[in-house]
Image (tube, helix red, strand yellow):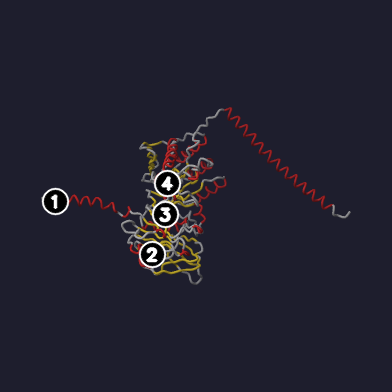
Amino acid sequence: MKRYLLLICLSILSILSIHIPVQADDNRPVLLVYDSENVYYNGSKKIDSVQRMLTADGLKIKTVMLENYRSGELSDNKYRGVVTLINWQEADLSNDSFTHDRAKFSGTKLHIGPNLQDDELEGLHAKKGMIIRQQLTLSDDGITEQMPYTNRMEYLVDVAGSDKYGVLNTQNVGNQKTLPYGVKVDSNAFLPFWNTSGLAVNCEEKLIADLFNTKTDSRPLLVINNVTPTSNLEYLDKLVDDLYRNNIPFAVSATNVESNTNQFAYKKYMYSLRMIELKNGIIFMRVPYLYSYTGKEINAQNLKATMSERLQLMVRSGVYPTGLSTPNHWNQDAVLGKVGLKSASNVLLLPDPKTYPKVKQTDYSQEFDKAYYVMSLKDLDKAKTTVSLTKANNLNYTLPTALNIKMPRTLSELRKVEKSVSRSELNWENPAAEDNSREMNFAKIKLEYHAGTYFVNGNEQNISDTAPVQKKHKHKEYQETGLNLILSYQGKFLTVFILVTLIGFVLLIYKGRKVYWDKFKRK
């Protein structure tokens, strides 16, 4: 009998030992609480940026507005951390239930902005100070950036035993202050403000990575954005050739369509995307532009059918997307996120447009194997720094970060983009050299990209460099060419006619003016 009891006890212990790891911290989301969208001062851009950076750190997030927070929501068994974002300092908004629950919460805490409470200062082992109407500079890794003028800012005084991320300096002559930007004390952290670009992003990434999930990624991914079937493919091909010649790995955010796919222009577009794959580039399929659904309901069924068809068209054309490119609001939507994004293991998280349709907005966002925080390379180049951030190859991006360049629409834009990339000294991420696989599973298709090789449902694929053939009769080509010549000469004729007419008007005005004044001259 004792033997049987012993066996039962051992079985129970083994079951418990199996199930304990399921309750690990990684399975719990982070609660993001913000006081206001502050639309007048474009505060939604900060909320969007914080969400994208937390997602890039591999976290699930629940986002709640402060006034909508309910007592008892924040607890140790439900959340691994809480982020407080004060987005409208002047309003001085508060919620006693949230303040009370946060004080009792023993998980990770990050406060962004002013209005630090006593319990937060206690966790940071610091006191609070205030500076008013100051011009600040931010320094990190030997680089200094001039920050926007600060009207009022809280900072920490007497911080003992803390990790610091960046240094702020005031420019008061004779009374200069040196203050920490990001501060972490154990599982508590503070940022006096949040910037969405520039040197501050590096400091924010380091702090968030150390606070939640330490990452080892340190190289940014170069991305060409806004590539569509109507883009100037000649400019795209030239840009891709230039990157390939200079041995610069890159990615492309490419939009697909499901109509007019039998046209020569579409075949040419798919050919350009295949050339990108041949020249050390990877493709992210851009999710549909929701504004294109004019008169058509946006629901799970329609969205699934659209994305499935677009992906299958690409695969049939020999183009194999390695992930999805999406505005952040898709990840904050129950329909768009569940249907549109769950199929990809890695995504490019683009900043949200100023306005967008909301299908079924949710508080919860999902996590990915790899989600990139996307910034503009142009904005990085324009930052007022002592050393250009595009030339600071010692500047690490702790979280997955993508630097975005827009698809050039003119020859002048193409030249500027080529110059900007060639002048950059950044050490770019090379997806072909990665050990991890990138996967997409959609419509019974499993796409995999590993070490520069593409697989469809486990079968290795060869990228074809065969150019599309335009199937047209010679007679038709002659008629179209003749029409083009007529239109061309007609345009030149009209240009000459307008110029001659303008010159005639100028001469008549001059002659008329001379005749008019001659009437008043004494003879």
Q: Is residue 112 above or below residue 512?
A: below
Separation of disc 4 and disc 2 at Cα? 34 Å
Amino acid on which the number 3 mark rests in the picture: Met
Q: Tell me the tag on residue 96.
A: 2
Question: Of residues 257 and 214, which is closer to you in this image?
Answer: 257
Separation of disc 1 and disc 4 at Cα? 53 Å
Q: Quadrant of residue 34?
A: bottom left
Q: Tell me the tag on residue 336.
A: 4
Separation of disc 2 and disc 3 at Cα? 28 Å
Crowd band around label 1 with a 10 angstrom C-alpha radius: few (<14), some (14–19), many (20+): few
N-term-proximal mark, 4 vs 2? 2
How many marks the image carries: the answer is 4
Q: What residue did someone put label 1 on?
A: 5
Separation of disc 4 and disc 3 at Cα? 20 Å
N-term-proximal mark, 1 vs 4? 1
Q: Is residue 474 visible?
A: yes
Separation of disc 3 and disc 1 at Cα? 52 Å
Separation of disc 1 and disc 2 at Cα? 52 Å
Amino acid on which the number 4 mark rests in the picture: Leu
